[in-house]
Image: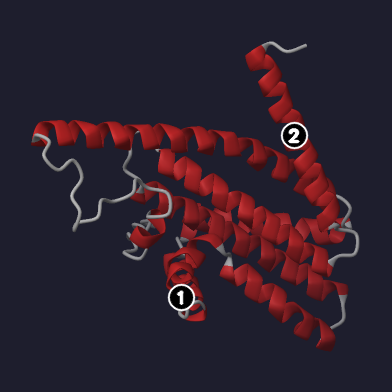
Amino acid sequence: MARKKFPKDKDFEEFEKLDVDPQSDPGVPEGVGLPPALQSKLQAVQKGSLSVLKLALGLSFMTFVYSSTVAFMSEFKNIDLKFQRPLWEGLVAFVVIYFFIWEPVKVYQKGQKILEAIFKFFAPLVKVAPYVLPIYTILLFCIYPIVRFFMPYDETLAYFMFLFGFSIALHLVFGAKSLRTKQSDFLKANYIFGFTLVYIIDVLLFSLLLNLVFDKFSFVEFFNVAYKTSQDIIVAIIKQIFVLN
């Protein structure tokens, strides 16, 4: 079956403004009095410098991507195995559907519309929230206590864990695809910077939500392990760079 081409979302242009090169104020042109060729070179240098800086920040965030993932896995192992498996099954189910059956683009975009409606009172959040917050995962966590009240069985939580895994995978995959298709800089600095930041926020949020469902999953412990792991990596890198003993 032919795969659907992922359409570019015009609203993503607003999200991109958070981490792309700042635009000049049309009412106050830069480089007044300078030759056009020199102005063009200055703008190119500025754009290149910002790309390098964002690339450096994005690569540095990889430390936190690794530490948050390790901390999450460490804490997630404390949950009963019968609830761990459905989460991974949900992740795998999405990957199989995405690659071999159907790309649920419309589902992802409807989730964006829901967040736009929720945050319509605050314009910056209207444009940012759809690409940062996993709306379906959040809604499922909100619905779970209600369903659990009427169906207080382990199977209920197992089904929801499957949906949690499926929904978070949907959000991360299409969020990454949105960033990748939109970013056009040569170094892919905006993509690396943006997606690493989104990933870290989502892992933190997902860990906090699991903490509300499972007594054995501690968000505080997760955060402490992530912080300690990041600190150790950063210290080791600094020692290697400056040859400290």
Give the labeled residue for mark 2. Answer: 231
Q: Is residue 89 visible?
A: no
Q: Nearer the viewer, residue 79 or 12?
A: 12
Q: Is residue 91 left or right of residue 155?
A: left
Most extreme residue toward the front is 33
* Location of the C terminus (image quadrant): top right
* Location of the N terminus (image quadrant): bottom left
Q: Horizontal and vertical percent for residue 30?
A: 20, 45
Task: Bin the neighbour count of mark 2 within 10 Å (Cα to Cα): few under 14, some 14-19, many 20 and up.
Answer: some
Q: Is residue 78 left or right of residue 90?
A: right
Disc 2 marks which amino acid? Gln
Q: Horizontal and vertical percent for residue 38?
A: 15, 31
Q: Residue shown at 63%/57% (left/top)?
A: 202
Disc 1 marks which amino acid? Glu
Q: What colour-coding does the image apply?
A: secondary structure
Q: Are marks 2 and 1 in contact (CB under 8 Å)?
A: no
Q: Is residue 226 visible?
A: yes
Secondary structure at badge 1 equals helix
Residue 91 image-quadrant placement: bottom right
Q: Residue shown at 31%/43% (left/top)?
A: 184
Q: Residue shown at 78%/63% (left/top)?
A: 210
Residue 39 image-quadrant placement: top left
Q: Nearer the viewer, residue 58 or 157?
A: 58
Task: Bin the neighbour count of mark 1 within 10 Å (Cα to Cα): few under 14, some 14-19, many 20 and up.
Answer: some
Checking the image for residue 116, the label placed there is 1
Q: Is residue 156 left or right of residue 177?
A: right
Distance, label 2 to label 1, CA atoms, is 36 Å
